[in-house]
Image (cartoon, rainbow, N blue to C red):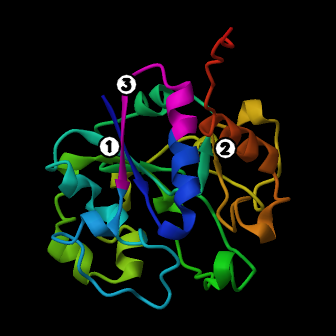
Amino acid sequence: MIRVFIGFDPRETVAFHVLSQSIHDRASEPVSITPLMLSQLRESMWRERNPLQSTDFSFSRFLVPYLCGFEGWAIFMDCDMLVLDDMANLWKLRDGDFAVQVVKHDHRPKEETKFLGATQTKYEKKNWSSVMLFNNEKCTALTPDYVNSASGLDLHRFNWLDSDELIGDIPHRWNRLVGYDDPVPVVQVSNLHYTIGGPYFDDYRDTDYADEWFAEKKSTLRCDQITKPEKG
């Protein structure tokens, strides 16, 4: 079973469901998807919201190993994404030498704000934590007490690990930053990340790869009707 946890923010509910559908549509193996909803995490996520926090799941993502009992493997993803590949292809990249595997972006945004006026924070290893392949048994530092008390920078810069050598790579195609990375044919992309703002926001309806997202939304809303024969 491929375990996937997706960050959930009520302001992007449609993004969560479209991403989930994009995963299921292409998966060749069973996938279990869990939304990280704060309303369901009251016993393990109690820290107050930080003014620089752009989404509800900025910190709850780091609870994934704990929620898995620090056993096995799991994938975390931001909700503002669209998967165009078989998740089994990401799952098979698991490497037991590492505690976590990520796309190691050199991401240095120039803008000061992003979607819904959120502050665009800048820090080392930015966006590394937006897709994480967790080797849960090597992430035991991520207890609820730690996740609720550590600084955002400590969490997102992986300071909870003894060494950066415990951070492995996954191919760039699994976290392609829309609006930053140069557009390429979709056959070269496994996961689109609408990190500045998804096409479900009016201000970003014309962003790169918007057509792909709207096509997936249409598929998500599909409901075939059974035509009943006319009486008489």
**Membership of 121 in magenta stretch:** no
Image point 83% across, 48% down: which residue? Answer: 183
Q: CA distance from mark 2 to mark 3?
A: 21 Å
In this rendering, position of residue 213 left or right of residue 226: right
Does label 1 or label 3 sit earlier along the sequence?
A: 3
Q: Amino acid at mark 3?
A: Pro
Does label 1 or label 2 sit earlier along the sequence?
A: 1
Determine whether label 1 and label 3 are within 8 Å by CB. no
State which mark lies toward you, 2 or 3. 2
The residue tagged with tag 3: helix, strand or loop? loop
Does label 2 or label 3 sit earlier along the sequence?
A: 3
The residue tagged with tag 1: helix, strand or loop? strand
Q: CA distance from mark 1 to mark 2?
A: 25 Å
Quadrant in the picture for the N terminus: top left
Quadrant in the picture for the C terminus: top right
Q: Amino acid at mark 1?
A: Ala
Mark 1 neighbour class, 10 Å CA radius: few under 14, some 14 to 19, many 20 or more: many
Q: CA distance from mark 1 to mark 3?
A: 13 Å
The residue to which callout 2 is attached is 217
In percent of width and height, residue 64 lies at: 28, 55
The residue to which callout 3 is attached is 30
In percent of width and height, residue 106 lies at: 63, 63
In this rendering, position of residue 92 left or right of residue 196: left
From this view, report whether residue 179 is shown above or below residue 172: below
In percent of width and height, residue 14 lies at: 58, 55
